[in-house]
Image: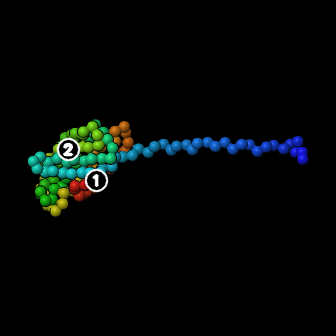
Amino acid sequence: MSFPANFQYPKKRVRRKRRSSPSRSVAPVLVAASFVAVPDPVLTLTFDRDIDLSNLHADQIEVLDGPGGTRYGGDAAGEGSGGPTLVLDMESVTPVTGTQVLLTASAGTGIVAVGGGAEWAGASDLPLPVG
């Protein structure tokens, strides 16, 4: 059997790798939090990855200690352990009433993952302790 003179074989299909989508910047996730009022008020926050505290705005973090009757605000710069933990000294701000200890932190805390990424979204009336 002979083929017509103008017969063309089909082109081989070329498979290309899929383009990877640009990585989205991911914010740190809070995995544990605790507050101790005595002897000195200290808030400890632990995240799922190492955090960068170079732009920390401690004034955006507060703890409402209902049983203790005091609202505390973040005092100056916190200190990190070079890893995922922030230890923040707290300062008494005003008296409060309530039955729970609650963490409130705005999205403007300046807490980001090491190496860039989105800023931590914060928390609103999160009961402590967490984790």
Residue identifier under label 2: 88
First-in-chain label (2 vs 1) = 2
**From the viewer's perspective, is 117 left or right of 8?**
left
* Res. 34 visible in picture: yes
State the residue at coordinates (22%, 39%): 79
Compared to 129, does 88 lie above or below? Answer: above
State the residue at coordinates (26%, 43%): 85
Query: Nearest the camera: 2 or 6?
Result: 2
Compared to 36, does 83 lie above or below? Answer: above
What's under tag 1, amino acid-wise?
Answer: Ala
- The disc placed on residue 101 is none
For label 1, the SS is strand
**From the viewer's perspective, is 10 left or right of 116?**
right
* Res. 110 visible in picture: no
Distance (Cα) linking label 2 and label 1: 16 Å
Residue identifier under label 1: 123
Query: Nearest the camera: 112 or 131?
Result: 131
What's under tag 2, amino acid-wise?
Answer: Leu
For label 2, the SS is strand
Q: Where is residue 71 in the image (x, y as percent from the top left)?
A: 16, 53
State the residue at coordinates (36%, 46%): 27
The single residue placed furthest to the bottom in the displayed view is 99
